[in-house]
Amino acid sequence: MLGILRIDALVPALLAGGLLAGCGGGAADGVPGDTGAQQAAEAAAGSLAQSPSRLSQAGGETERAAAANFEGTLQQVIISLGPDAIRSVAGSNDLATVLALSSDKVIDAVHGGAIQADSIHRSTLEIDGRMGRLQNEGEASYTVLDGRQVAAYVVDPENSMIMTMDPAKRAGAAAVRGEGSAPMDLDVEKVGEREIRGFHAIGHRFEFMDDNVATVWLSKDLERQVGPIFDIWQAINPLGQMDVGDGAPVRVVMVNREALASGGGIMPAYTITEFYDLQPGAVADGRFDLPDGYQQVDMADLMRGAQ
């Protein structure tokens, strides 16, 4: 869609064409600086992580009201690994073997120093009902999710620029290009139930963006607390609606066939996205305000210009 800007502040929405929010930035936790390919994979993983959520119709109005009133923070981490690192843990780069590999084992290997990640990025999501602010650790850029306007704003202080994502305008741009707006047709397989980060979760596996296999662990427990903010992410997802299952994402594992087999392509071989450490608490005033005097660019206009 565009050139590389940066994904770190924009994990929830901008992914399909490698549209990366913010700019510049170094590595985290002693991990080598990330490339555009790694950023694109993080975008894809992040979008998968945000997209499946929707409040369960069976939850009732009380749960919906409680989720809409949540105020506090949620942490996010994205770990990207190359084929050699995965091979050293799984014992093989065979796709079936890697898909059967416990993601807990991979995480333990990274944190224990047995393997080195290509990149590790941590973000904090501040939530106040239907408003959110996602900011990557050590980065000036951030994304504001506005549930009242059903839009997102990527704020890049270094370039004094705000990129706006409005789903209604995006749909209009897609129509100009002759693209439909129907939900993505996903062949979803249930792969089990387990506890992750203190939340009961159900795993769903499906193929995504041709060469990718995603395993998304969704939790109704997490959804009951912060569901509306993930609904907003789904509304602005440039890939369109992705109906995976009920719940909010706790963990997403994405495996890229091409990178796994040959190390080629634009995506890392293996990416884990996690949401964890949900903490209620007051969010400071002004955290969702947009700065004055910035140049504003609308993604829909950029999409029209790219046709």
Image: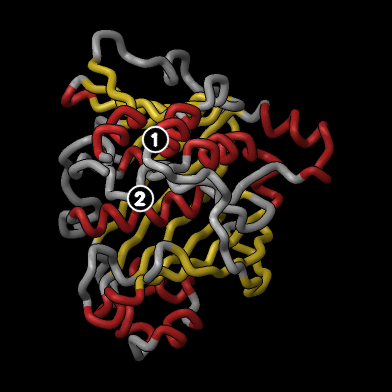
Q: Dot 2: within a 10 Å radius of its alpha carbon, few (fewer than 14), some, or many (20 or more) residues?
A: some
Q: Position of residue 35 (x, y in %)?
A: 18, 56
Residue 133 seen in render: no
Q: Dot 1: within a 10 Å radius of its alpha carbon, few (fewer than 14), some, or many (20 or more) residues?
A: few
| Residue 212 relative to residue 230: left or right | left
Q: Where is residue 134 in the image (x, y as percent from the top left)?
A: 41, 35
Q: What residue type is labelled 2?
A: Ala
Front-lying residue, 234 or 42: 234
**Image quadrant in which the C terminus is located:** top left
Front-lying residue, 14 or 22: 14
Quadrant in the rendering for residue 185: bottom right
**Image quadrant in which the N terminus is located:** top left
| Residue 17 relative to residue 284: left or right | left
Secondary structure under the numbered disc 1 in the rendered image: helix
| Residue 69 relative to residue 87: left or right | right
In the picture, the disc for residue 16 is 2
Residue annotated with mark 1: 176
**Residue at image x 49%, y 77%?**
102
Looking at marks 2 and 1 on the same chain, the residue that comes earlier in the sequence is marked by: 2
Q: Looking at the image, is 122 positioned above or below residue 216?
A: above
The count of marks equals 2
Secondary structure under the numbered disc 2 in the rendered image: loop
Q: Where is residue 34 in the image (x, y as percent from the top left)?
A: 19, 55
**Residue at image x 65%, y 61%?**
201
**Residue at image x 35%, y 39%?**
10
